[in-house]
Amino acid sequence: MKTQVGIIGAGPAGLLLSRLLHNKGINNIVIEKESENYVRNRSRAGILEQTSVDLILSSGVGDNLEKKGIIHEGISFHYNQKKHFINFIESNNKKTVVAYTQKQLVRDFIDKAQEDNLEIIFEAKAKKIEGLETTEPILFYEKNNIEESVECDFIIGCDGFHGISRVSIPGHEEETITKIFPYSLYGVLSDSPPISENIICGYHPNGCSIQSMRGAHLTKFYFQCPNGTTTNSWSDNEIWDELDLRLGVKNTRGDILDKTVIPLRSMVCNKMQYNRLFIAGDAAHIVPPTGAKGMNCAIADISVLSKGLINYYINNNFELLDNYTTIALKRIWKVVRFSWWMTTTLFIEPKQSFFDSEMQLATLDYLFSSKAAIKSFSENYAGLPIESNFSY
């Protein structure tokens, strides 16, 4: 096979890129290792920044998002038995975030792709990339135990941390920076209505906790746990008791549908391209879920990358593609900083000192006593601007 752009990974980043390119008449193929059913049903993020919402709507796949997305006007912090609310609309020029699950967003993109006959090859495991020194790199993948290949003008890796794309970039080891945090997050998806339509972050001596709405009767909870914790480490009743304690509220208890444990880390690959191979999303960077930035950061990458590819095919101009890493990293490192700040402000270190606890409380107290601090927080949480200095 031959195509203009080969995309590895049918997550939000890969599917959004495929749609944006298709809208401009640029042929592309998406290769996805998992089955369609698995991709449609995997549970991931659920908060979209304003910039992400705007790009999705502009792609033409936003009807369900507009109808079913739930606007979060702000975020609450619970600590010292008090509730503090930051109103995004008042502090950030009416910019908000929207609760809309990654699972539903992926379904929307797949449905629209199938309606328009875009090519997504499921259960096709990317195996290797060859010809990166040429203008026609080749992507090899395996489907039904048969090796296939597709010749491309460009290959875009949206295949996550464990995919083949990043490791296919020469020198990626020296350019990958990782920060491992000394704690994990226990994630719970509950069949129960949230006690608030807005996100709640709890600061407590036992550790951080978070409530995030996923629907009228679906809530995502997180709470801090030690590294090495397994999903069997806590019973359902223990989970609910701990969430009530840390959030400082009586949560609506329902059936727990899913449990996960997420070791926390930050990772940035400062080399996001090599000749005609580009990486985006979790293939290039990972942040803790604390700031709700993972999916949004991937979408921001695609905003820049799609414009670069369109500029190449329409204007035969490589300038934006050549500068993709530089442009993307300016925003990525700011997002990594904010996620690190949220994490280190709300999480309790093992054997944390009294000094460190007082610093966290002072940070929170300052946040809620300063209009400038509130505005800065709102600007970061609702989404930093995506700069590419190019429009089409």
Image (cartoon, rainbow, N blue to C red):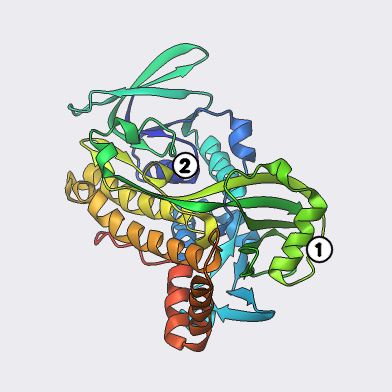
- SS category of the residue bearing label 1: loop
Image point (47%, 53%), residue name: 181
142 to 271, vertically: above or below: above
Image quadrant containing the C terminus: bottom left
Gap in Å between the C-alphas at discs 1 and 2?
A: 35 Å
Q: Disc 1 designates what residue?
A: 252
**Secondary structure under the numbered disc 2 in the rendered image:** helix
Q: Inspect the image, locate mark 1, and give the three-letter code of the amino acid beneath it.
A: Thr
Locate residue 4 relative to residue 206 in the image: left or right: left
Relative image position of residue 366 (x, y in whole percent): 48, 84
| Quarter of the image where one finds residue 17 | top left
Q: Which sits in the foreground, 340 or 87?
A: 340
Amino acid type of disc 2?
A: Leu
Q: Position of residue 300 (x, y in %)?
A: 39, 55
The quadrant of the picture occupied by the N terminus is top left
Which mark, residue 15? 2
1 or 2: mark nearer the eye? 1
Using the image as rendered, state which of residue 72 and residue 211 is in the foreground: 211
16 horizontally vs 310: left or right: right
**Of 109 and 370, the residue lying toward us:** 370
- Residue 249, how many percent across, how many down? 75, 71
Note whether 117 is above or below 124 in the view shown: below
Residue depicted at x 56% and y 80%: 87
Of the numbered discs 1 and 2, the one sitting upstream in the chain is 2
Q: In the displayed structure, would residue 99 be above or below residue 116?
A: below
139 or 28, nearer to the observer = 139
Report the side of 50 relative to 212 (left or right).
Answer: left
Which residue is found at the position 69% from the left and 51% from the top? 188
